[in-house]
């Protein structure tokens, strides 16, 4: 006989923790959080820099401090957690198989599940960079773990590929620990990181940012000895003759985050090719009844505050589901139209006020953000500056959705740059 | 003093050592690198070829067919993965068809069973994802796949469990003929043996030269590969080859026994015997040729790229002979070397016997090795029983490949014991998943340091200067 739990949450980072607290506050008591690391907190544990919590708490906290607040939400409510526990499988009828050192391999039947597994980093192998395969090539998050959790330096002279926030943060982190960060290369003509990070992590330390550059070759037999970088053209292809060799013993990669949806797929959850996360409705419920998703596993966030907000939506949604709420026949697709890379949610199944998250597909200035309900504009406002790196939101009132059968978000001129 | 010194711990040296360890004799394996399977044995296609490829009458042909016939049983004994998934040599036009018919005829002469030609319809049914432009194919149902480094580790391990000694980090510098046999000198060490077997891969000509045998030359040829996510592992079922051209076999597309998809190899000159670089041109060629055969494969899920060096002899065939009394060459073992390896081993032992090797077979030789990946094969109840005894089997370290700490510790304690993280990787598959060690690398450093009894700072990727960490943060010089 397998134990039945009302709500199982996969992942004990800010998404899972905040979702648990929200579900609890809606009356759910039989909750279990499963976390594979030995401690709760997720990736925030290794994000020792500050900048978290401005929205959620009105304070600027470090990653571990923000994680600590989320953990306190759960502890103070007495919500059960099992750490050091890796979920191996979720079946289509919500049977979770997990393992840890004390319980061994066990199964739990869940009435509702919230997926909060976060994301992983794209590795160097996925870029198929030619050259050798020496030690000294790491994804930025792995280097961050070495430095901030284990207390080890992964290298002394560093080139970073990718100017997303993780790359920028690690440029500063490595410098503060005495490494020489020689350059940050970014294949796009703009950085996807937050402007304040460019300022505080690169400019403040005199670290050059090489836009429209990429690494074209890795050198070094046993340990990395250097990289060849080159300028790229508008199609992001290396331009012959622009190659430059940079001696270094460390290459850090910050070249993309990929939501970790192996378990979601096992459970039969349909994913969006645009987000690599689940297709969800306004309550963050996936296509499988009773399975919800939030946080980086759903779409990669840039601010953890929005993760907490989204997690609360999922928690409330799961609570409503456990109370007996079921989606009615409403199924209003939200289309990511012109210059919109994706939206979350991708559909409305319950008419109510909703906040739609989206990202633009190219850098845009002074564009007009429009939301169309069955072809009629219900929102039309100026979007002063939007970049693919920054998640935006647009709020819709219940009345604006009305009786529409389809919604579309798109950007219309005025000035959009496609990166040339 | 050993009876037989085997130079080279690749799949050929490993199989030879294993074959010898069944006899009551002392075997020593010398390996230049920090671990076994460090050369071509870890960077090849993993195909157990049916045997239609090599020219009739060559050693390659005969040993391929014999080795391939024995491989399933060898894999079973050694507890390694083996899958008879068949092979297809795909043709796109009349000229290809002619070549395919030639291969069919050659295969039959070489003793390959069940070869036949498929027409478009049947080919489509068998492999629906292949390009619709493919018009025919040679089908070789006996072709199989293995994991070549898993096989090599297991062969060496089984040899060691039966008494063979392995010395890694031993680069042979000089060989002296003595009354009793040979003295083989490394940088700081020397080993004496009655017989020497040269299975030194790309350096086999250098080793042969040390005893005055300069009849052949080994020219390393680079073979680059792209490995894809398991999500694409089922795009083809058989190992799919292009029809060969003047340049060689051409690239293949194959599932691996671990359910990834492998594409490659190229065939390019190497700058020297250590040049294992992938190149922009090589990778582009793989992509272009792959697209021609498998139009639906997207390259957005590549996991890694790598390059192996083929030990190609200028004689066009394997060189397995005895140039002087007591010294046996097993040189120029490029494709189909992996497939032929069990047969090469028997052949070499035959040559040793001709040279006077007369040890008795051991009564207590155990050909069976427990699979490294035994945990996944246990029942749930057995797994939990094991976790009760050793909680580490309940702690998943590599989530992409589901490798537990218990399995990593187990692998680090089996012959041949790894001393670097690539060695741990090849034995456990930890770091071989889609995140390529992104999550598990820090844990592996800690586990390896603990098991090896050295500080984390000394853990390397593959020995030498390939340290993972350069020092501590804060307050370390």
Image: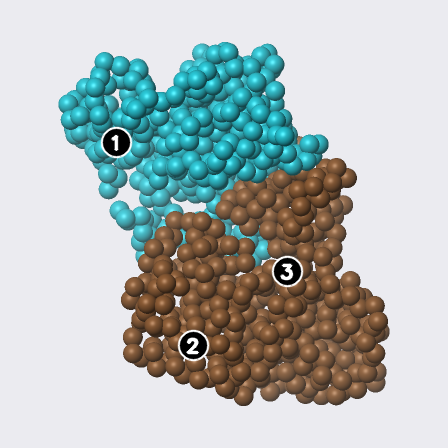
Chain colours: A cyan, B brown
* Dot label at residue B116: 2
In the rendered structure, find residue B54 and report the number of the disc placed on it.
none
Callout 3–callout 1 Cβ contact below 8 Å: no
Residue B450 locus on image (x, y percent): 73, 43
* Chain letter behind tag 1: A
Q: Nearer the viewer, mark 1 or mark 2?
A: 2
Residue A97: x %, y % from top left? 58, 35
Q: Write down the chain letter for disc 3.
A: B
Question: Relative to A353, is B80 above or below?
Answer: below
* Tags 1 and 2 on a common chain: no
Q: Is residue B216 something that shows in the picture?
A: yes
Q: CA distance from mark 3 to mark 1?
A: 49 Å
> What chain does mark 2 sit on?
B
Asked where in the image residue A279 lies, by quadrant, the reply is: top left
Q: Which residue is mark 1?
A: A335
For mark 1, give the secondary structure. strand
Q: Earlier in the sequence, mark 3 or mark 2?
A: 3
Residue in the picture at 70% in, 73% down: B16
Towards the viewer: A105 or B293: A105
Would you name the residue on which mark 3 appears?
B80
In the image shown, does A368 or B364 lie closer to the viewer? B364
Circles 3, 2 touching at the beta carbon (< 8 Å): no
Q: In the picture, residue A285 is in which quadrant?
A: top left
Residue in the foreground of this view, choosing between A168 and B412: B412
Q: Is residue B161 above or below residue A298?
A: below
Residue drawn 54% across the image and 21% down it: A6
Q: Position of residue B477 (x, y in %)?
A: 66, 38
A180 lies above or below A20 = below
Whole-number angstrom distance, CA of label 3 to CA of label 2? 29 Å
């Amino acid at each position: 006989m397998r134990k039945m739990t009302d709500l199982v949450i996969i992942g004990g980072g800010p998404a899972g923790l905040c979702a648990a607290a929200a579900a609890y506050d809606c009356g759910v008591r039989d909750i279990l959080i499963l976390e594979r690391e030995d401690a709760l907190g997720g990736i925030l544990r290794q994000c020792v820099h500050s900048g978290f919590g401005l929205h959620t708490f009105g304070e600027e906290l470090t990653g571990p401090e923000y994680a600590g607040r989320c953990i306190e939400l759960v502890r103070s409510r007495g919500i059960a957690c099992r750490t050091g526990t890796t979920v191996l499988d979720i079946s289509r009828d919500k049977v979770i198989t997990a393992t840890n050192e004390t319980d061994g391999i066990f199964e739990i039947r869940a009435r509702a599940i919230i997926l909060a597994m976060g994301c992983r980093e794209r590795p160097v192998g996925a870029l198929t960079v030619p050259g050798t395969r020496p030690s000294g090539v790491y994804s930025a998050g792995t280097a961050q773990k070495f430095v901030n959790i284990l207390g080890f330096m992964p290298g002394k002279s560093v080139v970073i590929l990718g100017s997303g926030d993780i790359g920028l943060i690690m440029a500063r982190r490595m410098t503060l620990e005495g490494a020489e960060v020689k350059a940050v290369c970014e294949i796009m003509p703009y950085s996807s990181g937050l402007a304040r990070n460019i300022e505080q992590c690169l400019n403040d330390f005199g670290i050059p940012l090489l836009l429209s550059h990429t690494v074209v070759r890795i050198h070094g037999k046993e340990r990395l000895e250097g990289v060849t970088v080159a300028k790229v053209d508008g199609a992001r292809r290396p331009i012959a003759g622009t190659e430059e060799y940079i001696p270094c013993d460390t290459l850090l990669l910050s070249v993309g985050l990929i939501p970790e949806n192996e378990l979601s797929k096992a459970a039969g959850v349909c994913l969006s090719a645009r987000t690599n996360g689940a297709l969800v409705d306004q309550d963050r419920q996936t296509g499988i009844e009773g399975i919800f998703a939030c946080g980086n596993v759903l779409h990669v966030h840039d601010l953890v505050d929005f993760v907490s907000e989204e997690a609360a939506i999922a928690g409330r949604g799961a609570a409503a589901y456990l109370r007996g709420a079921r989606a009615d026949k409403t199924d209003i697709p939200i289309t990511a139209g012109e210059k919109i890379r994706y939206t979350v949610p991708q559909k409305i199944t319950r008419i109510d006020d909703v906040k739609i998250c989206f990202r633009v597909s190219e850098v845009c200035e002074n564009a007009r953000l429009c939301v169309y309900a069955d072809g009629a504009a219900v929102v039309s406002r100026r979007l002063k500056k939007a970049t693919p790196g920054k998640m935006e939101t647009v709020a819709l009132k219940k009345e604006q959705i009305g009786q529409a059968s389809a919604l579309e978000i798109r950007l219309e001129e005025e000035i959009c740059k496609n990166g040339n | 003093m050993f009876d037989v010194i085997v130079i080279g711990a690749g799949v050929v040296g490993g199989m030879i050592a294993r074959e010898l360890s069944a006899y009551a004799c002392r075997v020593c394996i010398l390996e230049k690198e920090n671990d076994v399977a460090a050369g071509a044995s870890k960077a090849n296609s993993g195909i157990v070829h049916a045997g239609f490829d090599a020219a009739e009458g060559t050693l390659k042909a005969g040993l391929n067919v014999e080795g391939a016939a024995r491989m399933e049983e060898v894999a079973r004994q050694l507890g390694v993965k083996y899958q008879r998934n068949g092979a297809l040599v795909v043709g796109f036009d009349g000229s290809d068809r002619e070549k395919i018919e030639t291969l069919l005829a050659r295969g039959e002469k070489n003793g390959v069973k069940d070869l036949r030609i498929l027409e478009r319809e049947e080919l489509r049914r068998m492999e629906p994802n292949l390009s619709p432009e493919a018009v025919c194919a040679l089908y070789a149902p006996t072709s199989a796949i293995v994991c070549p480094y898993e096989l090599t580790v297991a062969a060496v391990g089984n040899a060691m469990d039966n008494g063979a000694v392995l010395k890694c980090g031993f680069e042979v510098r000089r060989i002296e003929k003595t009354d009793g046999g040979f003295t083989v000198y490394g940088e700081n060490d020397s080993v004496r043996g009655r017989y020497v077997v040269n299975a030194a891969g790309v350096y086999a000509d250098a080793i042969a030269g040390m005893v005055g045998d300069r009849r052949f030359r080994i020219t390393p040829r680079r073979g680059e590969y792209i490995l894809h996510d398991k999500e694409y592992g089922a795009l083809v079922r058989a190992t799919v080859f292009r029809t060969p051209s003047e340049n060689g076999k051409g690239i293949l597309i194959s599932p691996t026994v671990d359910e990834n998809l492998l594409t490659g190899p190229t065939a390019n000159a190497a700058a020297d015997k250590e040049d294992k670089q992938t190149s922009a041109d090589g990778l582009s060629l793989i992509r272009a040729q792959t697209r021609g055969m498998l139009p639906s494969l997207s390259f957005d899920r590549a996991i890694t790229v790598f390059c192996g060096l083929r030990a190609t002899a200028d004689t066009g065939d394997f060189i397995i002979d005895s140039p002087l009394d007591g010294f046996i060459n097993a040189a120029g073992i490029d494709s189909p070397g992996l497939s032929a390896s069990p047969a090469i081993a028997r052949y070499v032992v035959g040559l040793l016997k001709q040279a006077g090797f007369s040890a008795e077979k051991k009564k207590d030789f155990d050909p069976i090795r427990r699979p490294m990946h035994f945990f996944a094969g246990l029942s749930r109840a057995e797994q939990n029983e094991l976790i009760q005894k050793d909680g580490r089997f309940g702690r998943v370290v590599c989530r992409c490949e589901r490798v537990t700490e218990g399995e990593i510790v187990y692998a680090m304690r089996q012959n041949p014991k790894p001393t670097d993280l690539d060695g741990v990787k090849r034995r456990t598959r930890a770091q071989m998943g889609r995140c390529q060690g992104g999550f598990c690398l820090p844990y592996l450093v800690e586990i390896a340091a603990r098991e090896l009894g050295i500080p984390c700072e000394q853990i390397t990727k593959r020995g030498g200067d390939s340290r993972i960490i350069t020092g501590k943060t804060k307050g370390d010089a």
